[in-house]
Image: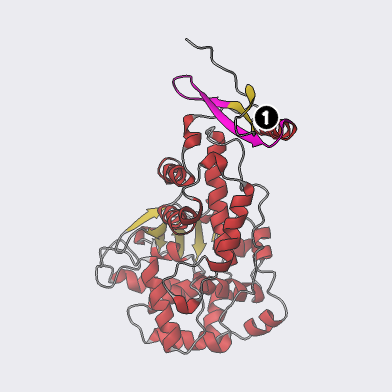
Amino acid sequence: MAKRRPSGDGMVRHKEDGRWEGRIVVGHKENGDSIFRYVYGKTQKELLEKLHQKRDLYRDVELTEASRMTLGEWLDKWLEEYASVSVRESTLNGYRGYTDNYIKPNLGDKVISKVTTADVQKLYKKLKKEGRVKEHPEMGYQLSDGSIRRIHSMLHLALGDAVRAQVIPMNPTDGTTVPKPNRQAKRILNKEELERFMAEIEKDNVWKDFFYTELTTGLRRGEICGLQWQDFDDAKGTLKISRTLHCTKIGEYTTGDTKTGKGLRTITLPSSTAQLLRERKKAALTEWIFHDPVRPEHPVVPNSAYKRMKKILADAGLPNIRFHDLRHTFATHALTSGVDAKTLSGILGHANASFTLDTYTHVTGDMQERASGVVGNFVEDIFGKGLSCYG
């Protein structure tokens, strides 16, 4: 039986075509056979310099046969064996989209151990210029900076696990440059806009309780959709936030933990919201506080709430804001109405008060002016009654 050659062991030879070839051992197959990496040079000196660089790269590395997989094959394996047990279903679906739509078409066929930092940088450059999935030509083909950063974050995680699994010697995403965050001022509904939004939801008997509760609590979309009657203490007027709802496929959903550990919280509701829920509970059909209008045994799913909000905004002639901006509206008006950052941090489920302050550093100048005269009794009821939270 041939002696097992140690990693780093190398060989140099002069080929018949005049080139110099070198190889080093970088790992072993399950049967003990060596896994080699090859380098070439026009002269022996050039080859030895390249071989020295390779030895430095693979020093203390013992690659497995998986190093011969393509990047696409590794990402499929990573999604199935690594990501699926560590992230939410919605996040996993997002990762699959990044893999299938952006990474595989560009780098998926390249052997993973040969993917370089330059390859990854070229990928980001190409995506920036023409990365959008071409289903909507009218929107252009440039991928947003935020999308590129999310693709980078996923690829960095996947290739970091490849390093730890001895599939590659180093993470090629290290050292790449990604677009910097372009933090735009958060969009909130000002006094006039909030009045119009409230007037519009008053016309909607199905959804008005949902959106009134959202505007008076600032819950995340998955949190408000996941509320059950067991979470509401009608005697104390409190609401326990203990789960979040995620869409998986059309018509399907899962429940999971809140976004952060601090997300598990109990808040004291404004008196008007508490009374609204007391009245709603009298006619409750299922365990869900806000159930699907057609299938009451199911909760309202986040996508349905998003679509309904967009229709309300359009019908009221309001700006096309995001659902999360309703949360920002609540938080901004809370701060400008005198709620301290620590209390608001608990209500919102932030990790700490400093994060809340960092998130809402914009609550000065123009924002304060926009938030200063909010809808009379509505905000007076929300913020004038000592809204608080309990751990």
Q: Does residue 202 appear left or right of residue 170 in this picture?
A: left
Looking at the picture, tell me which residue is in the foreground, 368 or 125: 125
Structure colour scheme: secondary structure
Magenta run includes residue 29: yes
Magenta span: 26-44
In the rendering, at what x and y percent does residue 284 appear?
A: 28, 68
Query: For the image shown, how many numbered marks are present on the structure?
Result: 1
User: Tag 1's secondary structure?
Assistant: helix
Magenta run includes residue 229: no
Q: Quadrant of residue 246 in the image? A: bottom left
Q: Which residue is mark 1?
A: 55
In the rendering, at what x and y percent does residue 280 appear?
A: 34, 72
In the rendering, at what x and y percent does residue 204 appear?
A: 35, 83
On the question of residue 350 being in view, the answer is: no
Q: Does residue 53 appear left or right of residue 238 in this picture?
A: right
Looking at the picture, tell me which residue is in the foreground, 99 or 217: 99
In the rendering, at what x and y percent does residue 60 appear?
A: 64, 26
On the question of residue 379 being in view, the answer is: yes
Dividing the image into 4 quarters, which one contains the C terminus?
A: bottom right
Residue drawn where x is 68% and y is 31% of the image: 51
Looking at the picture, tell me which residue is in the foreground, 272 or 3: 3
**Vertical placement of residue 73 versus 40, above or below:** below
Neighbourhood count class around disc 1 (C-alpha, 10 Å): few under 14, some 14–19, many 20 upward: many
**Vertical placement of residue 98 versus 109, above or below:** below
Q: Quadrant of residue 337 in the image? A: bottom right
Q: Looking at the image, which residue sits at the far top?
A: 1
Looking at the picture, tell me which residue is in the foreground, 351 or 163: 163
As shown in the figure, which amino acid type bears the numbered disc 1?
A: Arg
Q: Quadrant of residue 212 in the image? A: bottom left
